[in-house]
Image (cartoon, helix red, strand yellow):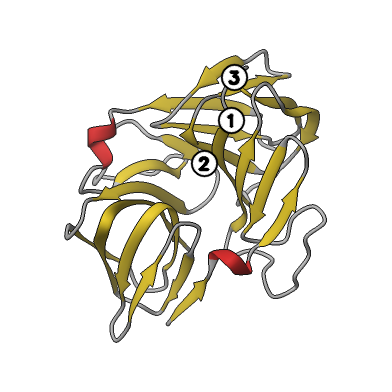
């Protein structure tokens, strides 16, 4: 079964320094039909003005991932981390027993575009931790690049370094040029979420073909294989393999 979540159906909020689209209920946007998918709880598409951002605030018991689409982000936290990172980097903060952090656009001149992802952890009260892993953009061109996988997992399909999270979830990024194809098999009992970061991509289930544009998403349950075809202009998307 494939369920499509169109970009224009998402929650939307705009202030003088930030414009956000909420795939799932968040902040002032509440929709009981869209509270998350499996362990994926938050997927926010944020555009933040130059030099602006979120001041110090607290989290606990959440795996918080940030993926930069344009620009850079500056992160500070109570663990002593002060980091600025840009595209082709996955940042993961395990909030665990509690952490305070701030996030600001790393540029004083240009707006930034970011995806913020929250994954509900399988265990509570872990020691807070921070990971930041950069990769060559070629690693996601025409193939899946693993960004994060369960802590302690032996994921034999991943030759590259990836972040660890406290949940049975695998997160990938991929770019497809026009006409390029990718396939991904889902093990029995697994589910998937696809989020289009930019461009357009066609997805294929057992009996369905759907065109997804930037900001669109699709949930997959009881599908054994999903295939993707890049449309004119190409596409970048995230793929979540979830228990």
- Seen at 33% across and 30% down, the residue is 161
**Residue placed under numbered mark 3 in the picture:** 109
Is residue 24 visible in this depiction of the protein? Answer: yes
Q: Earlier in the sequence, mark 3 or mark 2?
A: 3
Q: Secondary structure at mark 3?
A: loop
Q: Residues within 10 Å of mark 3 (few under 14, many from 20)?
A: few
From mark 2 to mark 1, how far is it between C-alphas? 29 Å
State which quarter of the image contains the N terminus.
bottom left
- Seen at 77% across and 37% down, the residue is 16
Measuring from the top left, give residue 13's x and y in whole percent: 74, 52
- Seen at 37% across and 54% down, the residue is 199
From mark 3 to mark 2, how far is it between C-alphas? 33 Å
Quadrant in which residue 28 is drawn: bottom right
Measuring from the top left, give residue 89's x and y in whole percent: 42, 30
Measuring from the top left, give residue 11's x and y in whole percent: 69, 61
Q: Is residue 142 above or below residue 4?
A: above
Q: Is residue 38 above or below residue 189?
A: above
Residue 228 horizontal side relative to residue 130, left or right? left
Asked whether disc 2 touches disc 1, contact meaning CB atoms under 8 Å apart, the reply is: no
Which mark is on residue 165?
Answer: 2
From mark 3 to mark 1, how far is it between C-alphas? 7 Å
Q: Residues within 10 Å of mark 1 (few under 14, many from 20)?
A: some
């Amino acid at each position: 079964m494939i369920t499509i979540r169109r970009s224009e159906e998402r929650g939307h909020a705009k202030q003088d320094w930030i414009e956000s689209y909420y795939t799932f209920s968040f902040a002032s946007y509440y929709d009981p039909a869209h509270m998350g998918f499996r362990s994926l709880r938050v997927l926010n598409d944020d555009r933040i003005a130059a030099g602006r951002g979120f001041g110090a605030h607290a989290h606990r018991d959440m795996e918080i991932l940030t993926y930069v689409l344009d620009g850079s982000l500056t992160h500070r936290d109570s663990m002593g981390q002060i980091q600025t990172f840009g595209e082709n980097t996955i940042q993961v903060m395990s909030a665990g027993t509690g952490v305070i952090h701030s996030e600001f656009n790393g540029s004083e001149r240009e707006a930034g575009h970011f995806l913020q992802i929250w994954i509900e952890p399988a265990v509570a009260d872990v020691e807070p931790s921070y990971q930041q892993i950069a990769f060559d953009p070629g690693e996601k061109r025409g193939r899946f690049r693993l960004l994060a996988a369960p802590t302690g997992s032996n994921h034999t399909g991943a030759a590259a370094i990836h972040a660890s999270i406290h949940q049975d979830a695998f997160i990938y990024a991929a770019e497809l040029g026009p006409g390029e194809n990718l396939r991904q098999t889902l093990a029995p009992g697994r589910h998937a979420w696809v989020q289009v970061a930019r461009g357009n991509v066609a997805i294929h289930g057992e009996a369905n073909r759907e065109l997804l544009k930037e900001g669109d998403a699709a949930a997959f349950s009881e599908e054994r294989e999903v295939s993707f075809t890049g449309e004119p202009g190409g596409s970048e998307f995230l793929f979540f393999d979830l228990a």
